[in-house]
């Protein structure tokens, strides 16, 4: 790709803005770990929610969506569309509970929910597991995707690109803390979305607009299979069994970053950082609406154009970048490269900050040095961030496929989701339930992949891998739960009094308290179902408008808007005035 002086000016201005924001928050971030990791719990819902969306909008996402769409059609995106149900559970069942917990990380939650040495072990185990191997794998695949983009556009080698990207991100993410991360996330999300839409417009122009795209696809693929929003359940890539696993198992059974059952990870971190419970719910709701319904279509359109322009690519993910390289005019090239940098940096800065929060709050401060002054922990956080960047750099160099990394992470987290859902609503879950679930999922998944030969890249292999891992993991953690002692009743009462989750699963504890048992459970279930309907109506409505089905599209979008209005009104009147946590 040939860049003009104006292209470079746009890129330099973007870097200067990001660095300026980071420097502006340096002193504030250095006050304490709470400021560095949680913005002192003062984030408004729109900023926290947009930061969640920006984090999931990484350099890898357009490439992975392109690969799924080229190989399997639009319906290939059910790999991640199925997680709508999980996201809406977080909105209506768990966001308030997380905010009431008033912890710094979801690992710290272990010692709020459980007690004694098992809880302390779980806290340290989970913190290290998520911060180092899991978090660094995520950073690695995102950086791999961005290095691929730089290689195709600027001719940079993978190692050189990786070092440059890490040094670039370190300039502001290490010094600015969460305030700097979320403020830059907001501008980076706007820039990344504008760049994605611009590329989609230029890409469509090369094939004669939407009409020309649809005509070309019909000519190449009679019957319009790539345009179907629902998969052909007799196809080799999505048989009935695999689709069943996607829509009926994955979303509640598997841990996956950004779509954790019951919330968790950086989503929980943003919830902890909000002003109160109302802001926590609205932040999670905005995140899910934007993440699933508003964001994917510019990427999908470019993927469909790449099918017309570059059929038969050995790596379909590269089609997105090839459209960018071959068909963007000057100035827009610089703008879109800046947009890719924005998408990359928003994700990496969050994962570095989030991962460091585990190592500092749940390992160093909890087990190494518990009585240091606040500024000391802020300094340790910055050093920890740099160490994680080095580890992630090594992982980056050895990754070859974004989609493959997605499926690997899904598989090793299979079966853990039910524990994360039930620990809030069933008193009998204990610390060993979680430890055994995490360990069993990891061991069983690897054994089934490398011992039994179940290949996650094969549709049926992936389905059987997920089902077997979920079944085995669930059996193991349930057995461990009943074979190990329950948490002390006094500790459970303290947790219930602080978080008040409700539900019949706390009857043994709450019967001796004055509070009721889950009076709002049915209402939350209705809100959850409506939230899922809203997202899918919006997602498929926008898609129908773009794919030449205006009547259906208008009806779907109109229905989504009406239901959203009713949902927000009902939340405000009945469920949107929760207890405020200071």
Image: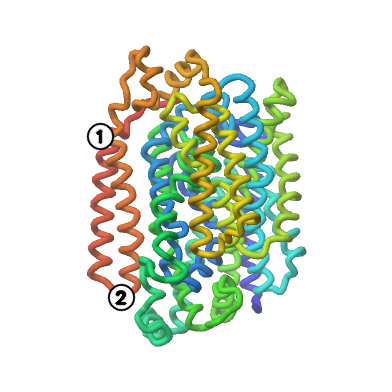
- Element on which disc 1 rests: helix
To which residue does mark 2 refer? 548
**Placement of 416 over or under 293, stated as above or below:** above
Q: Position of residue 164 (x, y in %)?
A: 73, 60
Of labels 2 and 1, the one closer to you: 2
Q: Residue at x 60, y 53 (%)?
A: 448
Q: Residue at x 39, y 23 (%)?
A: 506
Q: Position of residue 281 (x, y in %)?
A: 39, 38
> What colouring style does the render use?
rainbow
To which residue does mark 1 refer? 573
Instruction: Name the side, left or right, on which 333 lies relative to 425.
Output: right
Residue 527 position by quadrant: top left
Q: Position of residue 231 (x, y in %)?
A: 38, 67
Q: Is residue 270 visible?
A: no
- Location of the N terminus (image quadrant): bottom right
Q: Residue furthest front?
A: 452
Q: Position of residue 377 (x, y in %)?
A: 70, 30
Instruction: Name the side, left or right, on which 66 lies relative to 447.
Output: left
- Of 378 and 571, nearer the camera is 571
């Amino acid at each position: 790709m040939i860049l003009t002086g104006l292209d470079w000016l746009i890129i330099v201005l973007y870097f200067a803005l990001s660095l300026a924001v980071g420097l502006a928050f340096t002193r504030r971030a250095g006050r304490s770990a709470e400021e560095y990791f949680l913005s002192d719990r003062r984030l408004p819902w729109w900023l926290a929610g947009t930061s969640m969306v920006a984090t999931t909008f990484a350099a890898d996402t357009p490439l992975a969506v392109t690969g799924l769409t080229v190989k399997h059609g639009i319906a290939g995106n059910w790999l991640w569309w199925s997680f709508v149900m999980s996201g809406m559970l977080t909105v209506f069942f768990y966001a308030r509970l997380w905010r009431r917990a008033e912890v710094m990380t979801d690992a710290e939650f272990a010692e709020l929910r459980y007690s004694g040495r098992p809880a302390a072990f779980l806290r340290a185990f989970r913190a290290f597991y998520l911060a180092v191997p899991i978090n660094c794998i995520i950073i690695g695949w995102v950086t791999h995707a961005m290095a691929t983009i730089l290689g195709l556009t600027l001719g940079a080698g993978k190692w050189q690109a990786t070092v440059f990207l890490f040094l670039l991100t370190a300039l502001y993410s290490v010094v600015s803390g969460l305030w700097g991360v979320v403020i830059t996330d907001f501008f980076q999300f706007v820039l990344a979305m504008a760049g994605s839409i611009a590329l989609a417009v230029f890409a469509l122009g090369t094939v004669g607009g939407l009409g020309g795209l649809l005509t070309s696809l019909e000519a190449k693929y009679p019957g319009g299979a790539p345009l179907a929003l629902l998969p052909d359940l007799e196809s080799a890539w999505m048989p009935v069994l695999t689709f069943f696993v996607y829509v009926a198992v994955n979303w509640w059974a598997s841990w996956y970053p950004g779509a954790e059952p019951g919330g968790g990870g950086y989503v929980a971190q943003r919830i902890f950082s909000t002003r109160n419970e109302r802001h926590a719910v609205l932040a999670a709701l905005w995140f899910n609406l934007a993440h699933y319904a508003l964001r994917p279509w510019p990427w999908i359109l470019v993927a469909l154009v790449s099918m017309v322009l570059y059929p038969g690519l050995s790596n379909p993910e590269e089609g997105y970048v090839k459209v960018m390289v071959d068909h963007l005019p000057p100035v827009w090239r610089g703008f879109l490269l800046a947009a890719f940098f924005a998408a990359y940096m928003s994700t990496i800065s969050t994962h570095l900050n989030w991962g460091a929060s585990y190592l500092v709050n749940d390992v160093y401060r909890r087990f190494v040095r518990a009585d240091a002054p606040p500024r000391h922990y802020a300094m340790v956080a910055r050093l920890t961030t740099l160490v994680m960047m080095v580890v992630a750099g090594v992982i980056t160099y050895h990754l070859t496929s974004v989609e493959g990394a997605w499926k690997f992470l899904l598989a090793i987290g299979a079966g853990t989701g039910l524990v994360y859902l039930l620990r809030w609503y069933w008193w009998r879950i204990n610390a060993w339930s979680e430890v055994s679930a995490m360990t069993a999922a990891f061991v069983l998944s690897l054994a089934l992949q490398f011992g039994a030969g179940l290949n996650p890249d094969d549709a049926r292999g992936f389905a059987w891998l997920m089902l077997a891992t979920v079944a085995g993991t669930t059996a193991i953690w349930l057995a461990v739960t009943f074979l190990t002692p329950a948490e002390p009743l006094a500790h459970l009462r303290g947790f219930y009094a602080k978080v008040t989750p409700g539900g019949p699963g706390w009857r043994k504890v709450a019967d001796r308290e004055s509070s009721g048992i889950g009076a709002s459970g049915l209402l939350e279930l209705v809100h959850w179902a409506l939230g899922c309907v809203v997202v899918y109506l919006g997602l498929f409505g926008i898609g129908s408008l773009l794919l030449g089905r205006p009547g259906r599209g208008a009806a779907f979008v109109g229905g989504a808007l009406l239901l959203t209005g009713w949902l927000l009104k009902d939340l405000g009147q009945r469920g949107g005035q929760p207890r405020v946590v200071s």
